[in-house]
């Protein structure tokens, strides 16, 4: 330390005078004492000449030096000497053997160069000195107490201190800050174990203004006996390799983390999260307004500002305080600024602080200018999000806490990260657009609200699959039928997306058409099965999967449950095609799943379906649903059915509340499929609203039927409908008497409309035709069609029923 400080034990390190020279004879006696020696130790010549040289040693010579002395070879080492004042000084000395011509071997002791590490051969000293001094990597030598003995010029430059300032000090004494405490510990470990050690670290050295990656080799220095006499430290700057590995790690992280969902916003957030992990200090992802709205990207106009939406942003600071645009808000890029130029060019840019456009960009927002100054943002990358030749938005990478500015390699890395993310963003955008289209199509095909029915009260819920899966083909419907009856249908088309939604629409339309024909449930499913088979044949493998040679028939399929409830008889006829069984809740709260024949899924073709008729007490609750409600990947279907049973038990309250309770109880944590739940509470038409007459097949029965019907309508307070009722009853009974078979039955039902029904034993369906001028018949059904709001016929177990509905008077 140039004689300006001390070390533990009173040791002083001083600069050795250049004229230091001491001659020691063959017996170890001092014979020559120079002025430099007097200056260093304080002894006058008469005090030391003639005395043993060992009297000046404060510690024994190192073993290697003693061996060289014994062998008469040149040596150089540190020597601890006693000063006249009583202190101790460590100096670096060099011993050169001399010959006096009489066979004796005196020694000339002089100062040794600082970079000379120890005893060396005379012919290697010069090369050794030059090697240590001129090595292009930092090198230092430490003694057994981990105190610095020597260091080359590169090491002094890295440490920011001269050799004289550091000599005799440990690393922790030189720089009492992390990570030098760790370096000091590692050095002492090498001295203790005698084993070399390798260590890597990234940090900023005291003499550097930027961080570097350092690879340190700590090696023990051993003498001939194997004793550890010190250690050497060779430090290599591996910053380039560090950043290369770091870049590869970031790219690998981006491959694993970006695009985990098909959600545009979440994908943008994943990009921002990856980029602030060891690369940038603040990242923003702006999408073009059209892309953010889920529409097709619009071209970037070069002559006017562009509006974008901040979709995601992340910072190394909590809460992104650098942000001047909240997530989800719109902002704009002025013309002729770096963001606009990057969007137009379609490639990344690294604008410098002196770029005029960059200054314009900063000053376009006072908040942005304030943030740049406050957080000292000094380096920026702007990389456009482009996929499949289309620009989707722009990503900003900024640094303020990291002292190192972005390099060209960083720009290449940013472009690679953004390119990978852009494909995921575009996939998510396309998926969102298709899903929205499918969902819109599906919702347009489903009922908007339950119809007002006297036969039952209905409530339902439809939940499309979450953003992680396509919209499925689940559907449901409530169809009013003749005779105050109601049809309930729930179905699930195989597959997802627009194709499934379109198929669902076709099947729903077909069900409504077949329901109007009043087919029995098993017959309706048979007709629907034939339709699905035809759809599968018409589409074929090429339509479903272009280029697929493995597609086989049967890929268009569905499950379905169809039920018809009659409020007059309180009987419900049901059939199912591969669909989960309905649940029935009796008025006393008992829950059971109806044991209906399963039936094959629609689309297999040629297999039979079977109907089951169940009598329901008034106030019974039917629960129809799709498999997405009770099935989940992490649980057995029986678990879901038991949860449904528990949720339905003792539910006598409003159906809307019951729907919500069922979903809360049964719904899987992460539904992977669409879910339909439909609840129907049955009612019964009492005898006061239904009148039935059994008629003889006698023309005279027509007048009696007309009279009875008129009286009943008047008794219900519907006198205004008396004439139309008489006319319809007259025509329908006349047809039954003339063309039908026994038994002939007339029934009037007062529901939301006045319903007239005439049944007979013939299965021949009537048809409407235009009568010619001179025809005596053929006008009856034409008159019925003109008087009634709607009319039709249906097959029964004993024949047919012709019915007509009249609107009730206000």
Image (cartoon, rainbow, N blue to C red):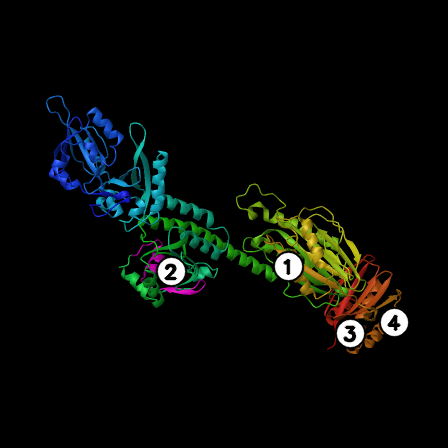
Label 4: which secondary element: helix
x 29%, y 27%: residue: 224
- Label 3 neighbour load within 10 Å: few <14, some 14-19, many 20+: some
x 30%, y 50%: residue: 210
Mark in front: 1 vs 4: 1
Q: Which residue is mark 2?
A: 300
Q: Is residue 514 visible?
A: no
The first of marks 1 and 3 along the sequence is 1
Label 2: which secondary element: loop
To which quarter of the image does residue 464 belong?
A: bottom right
Q: CA distance from mark 1 to mark 2?
A: 47 Å
Mark in front: 2 vs 3: 2
Q: Is residue 235 visible?
A: yes
Instruction: Say the numbered circle drawn on residue 728.
Output: none
Q: CA distance from mark 1 to mark 4?
A: 58 Å
The first of marks 4 and 2 along the sequence is 2
Furthest residue toward top: 103
Mark in front: 4 vs 2: 2
Mark in front: 1 vs 3: 1
Stretch in magenta: 326-351
Q: CA distance from mark 1 to mark 3?
A: 51 Å
The first of marks 4 and 3 along the sequence is 4
Q: Position of residue 552 (x, y in %)?
A: 60, 43
């Amino acid at each position: 330390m140039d004689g300006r400080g001390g070390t533990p034990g009173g040791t002083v390190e001083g600069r050795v005078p250049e004229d230091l020279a001491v001659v020691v004879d063959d017996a170890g006696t001092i014979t020559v004492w120079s002025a430099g020696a007097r200056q260093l130790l304080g002894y006058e010549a008469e005090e030391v000449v003639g005395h043993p040289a060992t009297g000046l040693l404060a510690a024994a010579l190192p073993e290697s030096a003693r061996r060289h002395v014994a062998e008469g070879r040149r040596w150089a080492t540190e020597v601890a000497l006693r000063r006249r004042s009583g202190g101790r000084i460590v100096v670096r000395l060099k011993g050169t053997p001399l010959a006096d011509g009489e066979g004796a071997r005196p020694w000339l002791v002089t100062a040794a160069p600082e970079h000379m590490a120890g005893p060396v051969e005379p012919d290697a000293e010069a090369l050794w000195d030059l090697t240590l001094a001129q090595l292009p990597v930092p090198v230092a030598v430490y003694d057994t107490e981990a105190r610095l003995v020597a260091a080359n010029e590169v090491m002094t430059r890295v440490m920011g201190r001269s050799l004289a300032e550091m000599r005799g000090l440990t690393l922790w004494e030189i720089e009492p800050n992390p990570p030098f405490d760790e370096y000091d510990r590692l050095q002492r470990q090498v001295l203790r174990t005698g084993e070399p050690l390798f260590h890597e670290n990234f940090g900023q050295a005291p003499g550097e203004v930027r961080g570097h990656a350092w690879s340190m080799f700590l090696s023990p220095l051993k003498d001939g006996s194997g004793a550890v006499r010190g250690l050497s430290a060779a430090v290599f700057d591996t910053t380039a390799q560090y950043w290369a590995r770091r870049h590869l790690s970031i790219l690998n992280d981006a491959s694993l983390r970006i695009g985990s969902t098909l959600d545009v916003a979440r994908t943008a957030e994943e990009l921002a999260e990856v980029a602030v992990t060891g690369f940038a200090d603040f990242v923003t992802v702006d999408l073009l307004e059209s892309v953010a709205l889920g529409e097709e990207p619009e071209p970037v106009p070069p002559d006017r500002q562009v509006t974008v939406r901040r979709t995601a942003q992340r910072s190394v600071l909590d809460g992104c305080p650098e942000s001047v645009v909240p997530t989800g808000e719109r902002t704009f890029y002025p013309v002729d600024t770096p963001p606009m130029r990057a969007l137009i060019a379609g490639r990344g840019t690294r604008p410098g602080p002196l770029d005029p456009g960059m200054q314009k960009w900063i000053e376009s927002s006072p908040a942005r200018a304030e943030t740049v100054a406050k957080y000292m943002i000094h380096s920026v990358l702007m990389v456009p999000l482009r996929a499949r030749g289309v620009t989707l938005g722009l990503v900003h990478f900024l640094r303020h806490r990291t002292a190192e500015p972005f390099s060209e390699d960083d720009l290449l890395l940013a472009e690679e990260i953004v390119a990978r993310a852009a494909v995921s963003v575009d996939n998510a955008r396309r998926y969102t657009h298709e899903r929205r289209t499918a969902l819109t199509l599906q919702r347009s095909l489903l009922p908007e609200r339950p119809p007002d029915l006297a036969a039952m009260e209905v409530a339902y819920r439809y939940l499309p699959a979450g953003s992680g899966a396509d919209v499925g083909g689940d559907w449901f419907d409530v169809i009013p039928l003749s005779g105050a009856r109601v049809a309930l249908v729930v179905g699930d088309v195989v597959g997802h997306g627009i194709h499934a939604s379109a198929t669902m629409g076709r099947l729903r339309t077909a069900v409504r058409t077949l329901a109007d024909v009043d087919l029995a449930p098993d017959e309706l499913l048979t007709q629907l099965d034939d339709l699905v088979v035809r759809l599968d044949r018409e589409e074929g493998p090429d339509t479903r999967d272009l280029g697929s040679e493995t597609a086989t028939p049967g890929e268009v399929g569905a499950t379905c449950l169809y039920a018809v409830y009659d409020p007059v008889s309180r009987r419900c006829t049901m059939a199912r095609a591969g669909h989960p069984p309905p649940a029935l809740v009796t008025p006393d709260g008992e829950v059971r799943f109806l044991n209906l024949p399963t039936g094959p899924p629609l689309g297999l073709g040629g297999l039979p379906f079977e109907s089951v008729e169940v009598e329901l007490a008034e106030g019974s609750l039917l629960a129809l649903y799709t498999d997405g409600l009770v099935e989940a990947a992490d649980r057995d279907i029986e678990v879901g059915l038991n949860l449904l049973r528990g949720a339905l038990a003792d539910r006598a309250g409003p159906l809307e509340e019951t729907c919500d309770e069922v979903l809360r109880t049964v719904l899987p944590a992460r539904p992977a499929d669409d879910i339909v739940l439909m609840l129907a509470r049955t009612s019964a038409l009492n005898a006061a609203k239904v009148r039935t007459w059994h008629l003889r097949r006698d023309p005279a029965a027509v007048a009696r039927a007309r009279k009875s019907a008129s009286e009943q309508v008047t008794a219900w307070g519907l006198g205004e409908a008396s004439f139309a009722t008489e006319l319809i009853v007259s025509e329908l009974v006349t047809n039954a008497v003339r063309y039908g078979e026994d038994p002939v039955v007339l029934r009037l039902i007062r529901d939301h409309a006045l319903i007239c029904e005439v049944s007979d034993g013939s299965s021949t369906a009537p048809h409407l035709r235009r009568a010619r001028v001179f025809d005596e018949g053929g006008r009856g059904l034409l008159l019925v069609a003109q008087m009634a709001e709607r009319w039709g016929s249906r097959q029964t177990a004993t024949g047919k029923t012709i019915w007509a509905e009249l609107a009730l008077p206000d």
